[in-house]
Image (cartoon, rainbow, N blue to C red):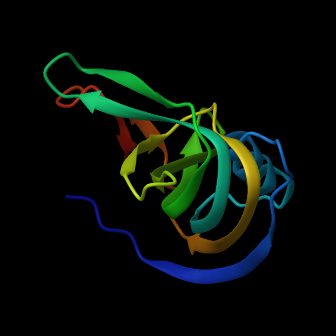
Amino acid sequence: MLIRKAQPGRVFVGRLTKEGDLLISLTEICRRKKVDHGELWAIGALVRARVAYYDQSRRQYRTVDIDTPCEIVSLVGNVSLKDGGPFVHAHLAVADADGHMRGGHLVEGCVVFAGEYVIQELKVRDPLERTHDESTGLALWR
């Protein structure tokens, strides 16, 4: 188990650019504002979405393409360090025009129609860095 104390820092709110990539945009905001640790939320709509599911037995991600306009029901995640820079780890739930929901791990390929975000910076004394965890095959905090 890993436990670190964190204090709230700056808060950034804003609107995402239409037709931008959701994950790339959130990551770029963190880079520009020098947010190395934080939590984030977003709502809005996507032209199309792409999420991933981690197959625990095969230890690999499987992507799921959602090639229809959809509403972001929930996007929640965190920011920490990976390979020396900010890394956004988020999960996304979307609903189509009939209210059917799909979701998973946010990956590149989600095209923004409209979106609003909140990024809450967290100040930590000992940085959280994602490194390979042998027991799961994932990049987890150490």
Estimate the x, y position of residue 25 in percent, counting from the top left: 76, 47
Horizontal arrangement in the rendering, residue 142 relative to residue 134 (left or right): right
Residue shown at the point (39%, 47%) measured from the top left: 103
Tell me which corner region of the image, top left, top right, bottom left or bottom right, holds residue 4: bottom left
**Which quarter of the rendered picture does the N terminus lie within?**
bottom left
- The answer to whether one can see residue 133 in this image is no
Estimate the x, y position of residue 140 in percent, counting from the top left: 36, 42
Reply above or below: 14 against 11: above
Q: Which residue lies furthest to the left in this view?
A: 57
Residue shown at the point (56%, 31%) measured from the top left: 67
Horizontal arrangement in the rendering, residue 17 relative to residue 139 (left or right): right
Horizontal arrangement in the rendering, residue 32 relative to residue 35 (left or right): right
Reply above or below: 107 against 126: above
Count the marks: how many? 0
Tell me which corner region of the image, top left, top right, bottom left or bottom right, holds residue 61: top left
Q: Between residue 108 and residue 19, name the one nearer to us.
A: 19
Reply above or below: 141 against 52: below
Q: Between residue 28 and residue 16, name the one nearer to us.
A: 16
Q: Residue furthest bottom?
A: 8
Q: Residue furthest top?
A: 58
Residue shown at the point (54%, 69%) measured from the top left: 125
Estimate the x, y position of residue 30 in percent, counting from the top left: 74, 55
- The answer to whether one can see residue 19 in this image is yes
Residue shown at the point (83%, 61%) measured from the top left: 33
